[in-house]
Image (cartoon, rainbow, N blue to C red):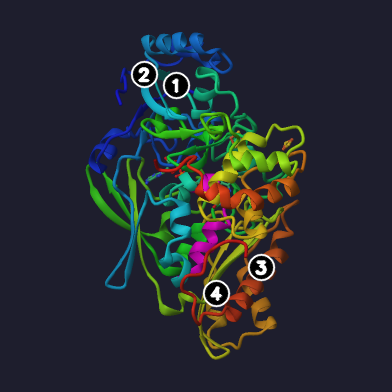
Amino acid sequence: MAVTRRSFLGGTATAGASALAGVAGAARQAIAQEVDDAGGESVDVSLVINGVTYERRLDTRTSLLDLLREELDLTGTKVGCNHGQCGACTVLMNGTRINSCLTLAAMADGARITTIEGVASAEGELHPMQAAFLEHDGFQCGYCTPGQIVSAIGCVKEGHATSEAEIREYMSGNLCRCGAYKGITEAIMEAREATHSSEVGGQS
Amino acid sequence: MKPFRYQAPSSVDAAVEAVEPMGVPGQGGAFLAGGTTLIDLMKLSVATPPSVTDIKNLSLDGIEEADGEVRVGARVTMAEAASHPIFLDRAPVLSDALWKAASPQLRNVATLGGNILQRTRCPYFRDNVSPCNKRDPGSGCAAIGGINRLLAVLGTSESCIATYAGDFANALILFDTTVETHRAAEGPRQIELEDLHVLPEDHPERETVLADDELITGYRFRLPDWARRSVYVKARDRESYAFALASAAVALDLDGETIREARIGLGGVATVPWRAREAEDFLKGKTVSEETGLQAGRIAFESAQGYEHNAFKIPLGRQVVAKAIFDAARKDVSGSAGQSEGAN
Ligand SMILES: Cc1cc2nc3c(=O)[nH]c(=O)nc-3n(C[C@H](O)[C@H](O)[C@H](O)COP(=O)(O)OP(=O)(O)OC[C@H]3O[C@@H](n4cnc5c(N)ncnc54)[C@H](O)[C@@H]3O)c2cc1C
Ligand code: SF4
Ligand code: FES
Ligand code: FES
């Protein structure tokens, strides 16, 4: 990874950059360049997301979640608390579930990422976990659902879905304000076997 | 978030050279491990390091045992350690303290180095506007007269009553653990875990004896056979994914029903990882009973001071200590190999 290291010029030179959140992709790219030119910092990252390689120069502050949503239009991954407390932003990094809000894009350089957009088959057939969530009403408003499904796949792959109690404990990192927990647990119970043998997030 | 430089050097020497200490606590560059404390606080602008040194390329991993001594690398994740046979079978308190902390997603990236150094969850420290001696030395403490339900009752000072929020350190401290570190000019040194954190006293901005450029490389400790008889009891507002209101790490050396030796660590109630030595001494030679457990709990909280909203932690803490002693005494340690951790 190439990191541009310039001496830090202090407050005024970088003041424009603090408005970065919420600015759309191309504009952010331009701002990243400006920040860099102004003596702030940027970083080059290369990641494989759902099988596609992306290379970007980013403001060092960009979280993996920002990169997915703001730069790459992969908006399936949701922003909830933005502080590691709710699990809405869960993705698989090299096969393990993580909170993308507390991970800098730079930390994920070289990693393989799977988001909710990448769990169905290439032919569009739902992942067994997706199908089970539909079947068991594992959601109401649906906002937490992408995070729940990706986390559930991670939970099963980690071997922590051996009982209902264990599923509840090992899914506790995903909050659901609608309280769809019963359906979520049932869906995981049903889909765990098929998920074990599914390729998603595997080491392939 | 304030702009910062990001670097990911590939050796310990390069990392300690790169980290850019400024000589003032909290002002210099920061090491970055899992980021679950650091990135969180940077997003709140509570931490504003000018540069971040990611240690992801350093080979500080692995859990090994040689000549009776366990060595754990600082980059081992909470998830990896929680399910490692040495933690799971030989000292379940270590595994328990890990899997009962944070969430699976966080444990998959959070490291044992960063975990021990996690910062307090004091809401006034985190809000970045209230007077807070830890964040802004000399500004006062909004928590002492504020909503202090989650704050500490042991080891507090007139400057700060922030709880040390971590779980793992309260368990690791039972085994007289040594912390291995590395600095740029001075090279490696060893610090007893019990001496790593410092009481807030008049300088709550200083939390550990580590220098700004000092990297934790790993931990070393010895597990007595009886460490198998150990538990971590954690009382919290919800059953999972919450910080401790009061927790107790207990390991017991039993001769029948008689306690030969007891070790007790407390969490959620003190300003630093806490070893309840007076309660340990009291238990020596005693017979396990509800009354001995509660008496040990009373002794552990003898010096506690409650504040407006957190005084409940004192009776709660006593009960948690008693329960942990009882659970440890009753623990089946016959054939513990191969059990899986988790809520079953
Ligand atoms: C929502 C939430 C809930 C949580 N619940 C709990 C809980 O119940 N119990 C619990 O114990 N914890 C809990 N945590 C805290 C979590 O366990 C810690 O954030 C985590 O362990 C920190 O590890 P890290 O590798 O991510 O550290 P980082 O965030 O990378 O680093 C933490 C600090 O340590 C420094 N550092 C990191 N590694 C080193 C090193 N090797 N040498 C020197 N300095 C270093 C960094 O500069 C930083 O100051 C929770 C966190 C969140 C966000
Ligand atoms: S208790 Fe400590 S951390 Fe909390 S506001 Fe007071 S000084 Fe700050
Ligand atoms: S948005 Fe990441 S955990 Fe809530
Ligand atoms: S379905 Fe609405 S938050 Fe979970």
Residue tagged 3: B320
Q: CA distance from mark 2 to mark 4?
A: 51 Å
In the image, which is nearer the foreground, mark 4 or mark 3? 3
Residue tagged 4: B278
Q: CA distance from mark 4 to mark 1?
A: 48 Å
Residue B43 point in image, percent of width and height? 54, 29
Q: Nearer the viewer, residue A179 or B267?
A: A179
Chain where mark 1 sits: B
**Label annotation for residue A8:** 2
Quarter of the image where the N terminus of chain A is located: top left
Dot 4: few (<14), some (14–19), or many (≥20) neighbours within 10 Å?
Answer: some
Q: Is mark 2 within 8 Å of ligand 1?
A: no
Q: Is mark 3 within 8 Å of ligand 1?
A: no
What kind of element bears circle 1? loop
Q: CA distance from mark 2 to mark 3?
A: 50 Å
In the image, which is nearer the foreground, mark 2 or mark 3? 3
Could you tell which of marks 3 and 1 lies nearer the N-terminus? 1
Quarter of the image where the C terminus of chain A is located: top left
Chain where mark 3 sits: B
